[in-house]
Image: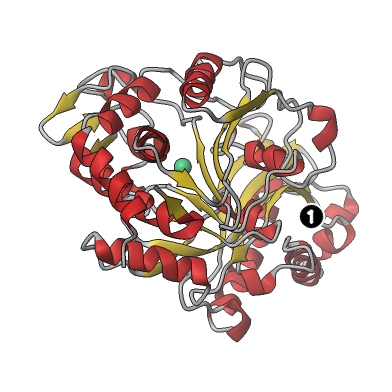
Amino acid sequence: MTSSGTERILRYLDQHPNRVVEITQKLVQADTVFMGPGTPARQEKQCQEWIASFLTELGCTVDQWEPDPADFQDHPMYQQRLRWEERPITVGVLPGTGGGKSLILNGHIDTVTAEPLDRWTRSPWGAEVEGDRLYGRGAADMKGGIAAFLAVAEAVVRSGIKLRGDLMLQTVTDEETTGMGTVAAIQRGYRADACLVPEPSNFEIWVAYRGILYANIRVDGRPAHAEIPQPHWRAGGGVNAIDLMRKVMDGLDALSMEWQGRPDKQHALLATPRIFPTGISGGEFIASLPARCELQIDLTYLPANGDALGYGSAIRQEVEDHLARWAAADPWLRENPPRITWIQDYPAAETSPDHEFVQALSVAGREEGIKTRIGGLNSWADVASYLLAGVPSLCFGTGSIERAHTIDEWVSITELRRLSRVLARLVGGWCGAQE
Ligand SMILES: [Zn+2]
């Protein structure tokens, strides 16, 4: 049963169908590409200030701040040189009247690069509308999703509805490269009874996320003239570091293969983890046996593989032990073992599909004619941070994740309106809507 309060919010949305489009356009028009730690801010601050004034006008208590990197040096996801200057985080709170459940709606304003720009058929920041499509970098991932929840907040206030529980609207920087924006919002104390992040999930309810580990593996050989026959290395001959890395890669493949059949590596909603080489460099001169080779790897893990804090310490140990055993079969590598440097660790996390918040969203979706399927994301997303903080959290949004990060990225306007209606029902039902 939809309450009359929720009906009024829905009616407001229907009477103002272009608001979600206008808000998405405003957000897309800000260039919020983030190229990674150490690179300058673009228009994140203007974008966040626009959101802050939007929320202030609605009567929200607005908190906007630039986190201090010193507070996050030891965090497993933190990257050196990450700074928040000109890249603030914004949280608007619409205080409830009491007696309802609180809800966080969270989205990231940062986008990945729009390069190669010359292959776009329209400006990535033009926010052009053509038919049902709104084009632009971040339109799908995930400024459209943010616009949907901002439009809902506006509809709540402008239709004169009071929510019982607090509604928190968070827009963060740093999801795409480090995930530290939401970590900073949690550290500032923002918690609720549930959290929804409208990433482009194609109206699937994502309740599970894989953890990710990035590492660098280095092997050292011994440089020598490549064309001159070499004595055995024990007699001072050269050793080719690239050949050594081939053995290391075989070892990583063997572990990946073993995982495919292992019960602890299976999950109903997530793919079985693997180890992928994603970068390699080595060799100093074309006529020299390389002295050094480095490999970058990306590997994933399931929530059940996480340690007590949800992170991949056990997986790190497993990979190190396996590689040490594997390398021991090679006399040189036994004495000169590969060295692994772990770069980042994004924790795996999940919430039960039976949780009342998941059920509430399923009902809201059904009422809008969406057969909401339960799914998982084989990558990591900001919600994992909220899950680890003990807040039941999920992703649910319009458009498919395959449309994210692409040339001519777009979002469907019909779907944006539909997403707003689902979120309005969720907010009204979860927080409690009073006329
Ligand atoms: Zn995203």
Residue 135 in view of the camera: yes
Please name whichever residue, 183 or 163, is drawn nearer the observer in this view of the structure: 163
Find residue 203 and report its horizontal and vertical position in percent: 32, 57
Q: Residues within 10 Å of mark 1 (few under 14, many from 20)?
A: many
Identify the image's colour scheme: rainbow, by chain, secondary structure or one colour.
secondary structure
Looking at the picture, does residue 76 appear above or below residue 234?
above
- Identify the secondary structure beneath mark 1: loop
Residue 246 in view of the camera: no
- Residue at image x 29%, y 34%? 409
Find residue 180 and report its horizontal and vertical position in percent: 67, 38
- Residue at image x 39%, y 24%? 27
Q: In this rendering, would 356 be left or right of 199?
A: right
Q: In this rendering, would 51 be left or right of 383?
A: left
Amino acid carrying label 1: it is: Pro
Please name whichever residue, 327 or 404, is drawn nearer the observer in this view of the structure: 404
Q: In this rendering, would 312 be left or right of 370?
A: right
Instruction: Tell me the quadrant of the picture where the N terminus can be found.
Output: bottom left
Q: Residue furthest left?
A: 131
- Residue at image x 33%, y 20%? 117
Residue where numbered disc 1 is placed: 338
Q: How many marks?
A: 1
Looking at the picture, does residue 72 appear above or below residue 264?
above
